[in-house]
Image (cartoon, grey):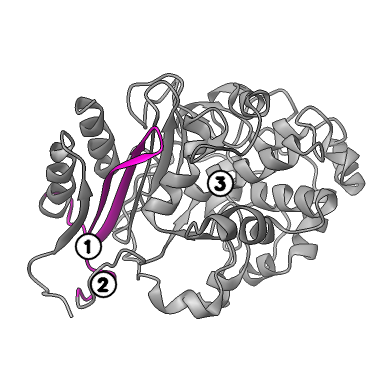
Amino acid sequence: MSSTHTPNFSGHVAPGFEPVAEAFRANWTDHDEIGAGFCLLRNGEVVVDLIGGWSDRKKTQAWQADTLIPVYSTGKAVMALTLGKLVDRGLLDYDAPVADYWPEFAAGGKSDVTVAQALSHQAGLSGLVEKMDAGDWFNAALIEDKLARQAPLWPLGDGSGYHPITVGFIADALARRTDGRSIGAILREDICGPEDIDFHVGLPESEHARTGEHAMPRQLPALGNMNAFREIAFMKPWSSPGRRGAAEWRSAEFPAANGHATAKALARLMTVYADDGRLEGRRFIRSVTLGQLVKERICGDDKVLPFNLSWGAGVMRNTTTHFYGPGDQTVGHSGWGGSCAFADPETGLSGAYVMNRQQHFLAGDPRPVRLIETAYTCL
């Protein structure tokens, strides 16, 4: 049981990084934080690993070191790593058409869409046009059939338009048609399980009890002027999975949308981006593969998110927005409500912020921005 008035804080802060702890605590006074975690590694060594507050909305249960929380689209950075592993194994080629692995995907004029273009949100499938029930997302075969048949919402080569949910189904279809397993299974069996990294796509029921409760945003995100692409992606009754209850949602595998993690787990995974393809000192993917993953695939005003964005093959590049500190070589991803994960190969930093008080920022939430900016002042 934890006090409903004063949050408790715990964790590790290396000498010189004390200002990060001060910024972390300030989020409770300045931004009405409930519970959160922030972890920062430098050259693979933990320099900050903080938790604080409560895991439930009523503020009765303290946030623990192993409290899991959905990180929504922040998990796309891990999804991109998983696909990068398949590229590194020779099962996928970023420059090959998706239809080479998934022939049905060629329908509707999509035969030329490459794996890298699909992962960088250029396929014109930011959402599903055909009216359906929000519960239909739980039927992967049905969603894949809809995606394969649907014509692009804009021509290939006409820019990016963020695919909040659908990019995960495209990625998972590629994984199962090449490796034979889902992204969630690859993570469990090859990546997170063997390394004891507490990140999950498809959370086992045995782990549901340690998952925190979210407090929903108090206002809608600022999407800018509404267009057909944004409406399909975010505003339709079927734009995101629903109608099945929290337990079934946690157990389902939506690689782009429902990863569950601790901040430390995400920060550990992001070391692959910061350390030339190595995961905590051991080779995860070759340098050349990492270069292909993070290189710019498209840059400009996104048709769905109200930002000028530079995309790699599944990750946001920091060159236009600087959501993740000052580094132009930094990559990362943000999730609905405020979570984020990032990696900077120039400084060797990798980090992640998770929380249960969701805010309305689509990216660049001031809570992690302050933590990241403060961390850079400590270098």
Q: Which numbered marker is on residue 34?
A: 1
107 left or right, relative to 170: right
Q: Which amino acid lies under the numbered mark 3 shown in the image of this protein? A: Val
- For mark 2, what is the residue? 57
* Quadrant housing residue 328: top left
Q: In the rendered structure, does residue 370 fall within the stretch colored magenta?
A: no
State the SS at label 2.
loop
Q: Earlier in the sequence, mark 2 or mark 3?
A: 2
Can residue 115 be spotted in the picture? yes
Q: Residues within 10 Å of mark 2 (few under 14, many from 20)?
A: some
**Quarter of the figure that contains the C terminus:** top left
Rounded to the nearest whole Å, what is the CA distance between mark 2 and mark 3? 28 Å
- For mark 3, what is the residue? 78
Could you tell me if the residues under marks 1 and 3 are in contact, i.e. CB atoms within 8 Å? no
User: Which is more toward the observer, 247 or 268?
Assistant: 268
Q: Is residue 274 above or below residue 300?
A: below
Q: Is residue 353 above or below residue 156?
A: below
Q: Which amino acid lies under the numbered mark 1 shown in the image of this protein? A: Ile
Rounded to the nearest whole Å, what is the CA distance between mark 1 and mark 3? 25 Å
x, y (%) of residue 335? 44, 48
156 left or right, relative to 337: right
